[in-house]
Structures are given as C-alpha cells and as structure tokens.
Amino acid sequence: MTQELVLKNARIVLEDEIVDGSLVIREGRIAGIDVGSSVTGEDMEGDYVIAGLVELHTDHLESHYSPRPGVRWMKTAAIQAHDAQVVTSGITTVFDCLRLGSDADDGFEKGEMRAMADALLEAKKEDRLRADHLIHLRCEVSTTNVLEHFEDFRNDPQVRLVSLMDHAPGQRQFQTMDQYVFYYKTKRGLSDEAFAIYVDRQLALSAQYSLPHREALSKACIERGIAIASHDDATLAHVEESLAHGVRLAEFPTSLEAARASHEAGLSVLMGAPNIVRGKSHSGNIAARDLAAAGVLDVLSSDYVPFSLIHAPFLLADEIEAISLPKALAMVSATPARAVGLDDRGRIAEGLRADVVRVRRPSGIPVVRAVWREGRRVA
C-alpha cells in the first residue's frame, strides 16, 4: 500500500520563495507542492514547512560523551541524547565531529573516536536514531599522530567530511595570544613557565607537521571523494593553500579578507550560528553577521548549540535587508547539502527526500513543532 502524507495549510519555504499550500509526501519522497487550499491532509495551521536542516560541524556529541573532565559516558546513551537534541532543533542530517590527532593533554586516547564511530554505526543498525548521522573528522594537522588516527577511518563510508585544522598560537583562530592564554593557560591552570614550554612545543610541531599532514590528508580525501574543509583561514595565503589542497568548504574564516577570497573562489564559507545569535565570536574573531552583510556567508553550523541552527536564519532575515528568509534558511539546508555532495536533500522539491520541519514563529525565537525524516515522523 502506498504511504502518503499531505501537509496542508502550510507556508512552504522553497529555496527562493515562500508559497502557501500543501506538501505531498509519498513513500518517503516529496511528491508534489500544491499551491492554494486543500481539504485533506494534516493541518499545519499556517506554520512554516521548511527543508530539514543539514548540520556539517557540531562538537555537541563530544559534550555528551565527556560531560566533565575525565568522565566518559556510555557511548550509545551519549549518542541517543545528542540525537534527540539535534532532531528537536529541526536537524535531520548531522555530521558528528570526531577529533583526530591527540596531544598528551587533550584527554582522549587513540581508539576512542574509532569506538564512537562503531557505536554510531551500531545505533543506526538498531534503529535508535532519528536523524541521519554522518561523520566529520576534525584533523589536527600539527599533531604527530593524526595520520595514524586517520588510518582507523580510511575506509569508513560514514566519513563524508574532513577538516584540516591547526590551533597553534599566533595564527588562524588564535592570531593574538589573549584568547590562547585563556584556552590553554587559564583553563588548564598552567604556570607561566609551563605555558611558555607548551607554546614553544606547539609552534615547533606546527612548523614540522602541518604542511606534510595537510598534503597527505587532502590526497587521501580526494582519492575517496570525501569533501575537505579548511579551518580558521585568516589570510590570502591561507586561502591559496586551501585551494591547492582541494578544499570545498571554508570553516570559520577569521577575517573578512579570507572570507571574501574564499567565497569569490567558489568555496562555501561556513560560520557558527551561535556567532549570529550572540552577535559576536566566542574567540574574539570577526562576527558572522558582518560576513552576512558583506554577502560572503554561505553556510551556518550549530557548532556547540544545536538549537542555534534554526534560530540564526530568522535573525539574519530580520536584520539584514539583502537576506530573505528563504535565502537564510538555504544556509542551513540547501547550501550545506550541496557543499558535501548530498544532492538528495536540503530542499523542498519533487523527488527529493522528505526531510521536512514544521516551524512556528509567533515572535522572537522559533518553535519546532514537528519533524519528518524520509516521510517518517521523528519528532
């Protein structure tokens, strides 16, 4: 028997316009968009119906797995808690970030991330998850062991995105030492002497390993068809380096110069939705709203607050004249899906997956009222 669902009396947000009408879903796919009134179907009461959000960069799973320093929660329980929060934020496809490349001080041991990936795969098999979970490997290229850790994932089909990161002081995210001191001295309780030794070590590791590891990882990703992201590019030289390595996504550029150069080169510029909601970067770099106003912001990521991904587009549409609501919502659906080659989702269009979200916004903060993934109600 054909399974059909009709969502009537909806404000359907397409990629470039909003139409009033009904959305027809059949066998997990979008079968039609009927403009005007309909007598049959589930009444959306004039709420927005939007494409399910596509989240490319979230560190949120890690906070469930390690909620306190030295604490490890049960992996499956952590995954389910994370999954519940992202789905009720309207996210139907989520790239869970797993960190590769470890320092003696970062608290994670070799094999932990591989074990988490295995737990994710098992949770999928057991139908525990409501969102579609894929993996984003955050590769710290200045560590000695990042290539060794990457070998654990070389043939894992869950991996669809790899970011090349270097958090050494004095560059990229930490162009000034103020925030670096806060992250790596104050929070860790290091003495002046211990911090100086730590900084010198990080600079030496970056100088020795960053470039060869970028080259090795980008080569492996290109061979496998994995999308590559840069991270915290700050200068034109950084952008040129990213282009040479086949990067398609520019994550969190720290200057307008780097963001504009990335955007003009055809890369999708990604910034954090929390940056939009707060009006500033948590690390003191450029505000995402400034990039949006300059027309060089393409993708939003929830980063560390899942609900920010549904909240931020409405704020952009409210505050920036050149950004309509369809254009803002495309930053969290159509554009991120395209950036990583997921052409079967991210838009409300016939033939695509019926990943859709019902959203009401009486004022201020939006309310997610229902979520369907492939036509199945999941929240």
Image (spheres, helix red, strand yellow):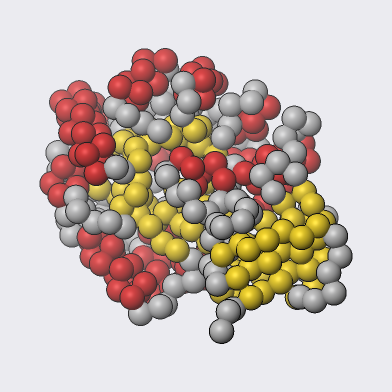
Return the residue found at the far bottom. Answer: 1
Q: Is residue 39 above or below residue 141?
A: below
In the image, what residue occupies the spot 75% across and 38% down? 324
Nearest to the observer: residue 210 or residue 56: 56
Q: Is residue 114 left or right of residue 359?
A: left
Whether residue 88 is visible: no
**Residue, x 72% and y 47% (percent of image)?**
314
On the image, which quarter does residue 217 sit in?
top left
Give the camera-side residue of 305 and 134: 134
Horizontal side, residue 296 vs residue 241: left or right = right
State which quarter of the image contains the N terminus.
bottom right
Q: Is residue 124 above or below residue 296?
A: below
Residue 79 x, y percent position in the rendering: 40, 69
Screen quadrant of the C terminus = bottom right
Can residue 253 be seen here? The reply is yes
Q: Nearer the viewer, residue 355 or 153?
A: 355
The residue depicted at 36 percent of the width and 31 percent of the height is 247
Coordinates of residue 206 in the picture (x, y in percent): 22, 28
> Where's residue 182, x and y in %?
42, 38
- The mark tally for this picture is 0
In the image, residue 164 above or below residue 148: above
Q: Position of residue 65 (x, y in %)?
A: 36, 65
Return the residue found at the far front.
Answer: 1
Q: Residue at x 40, y 33 (%)?
A: 248
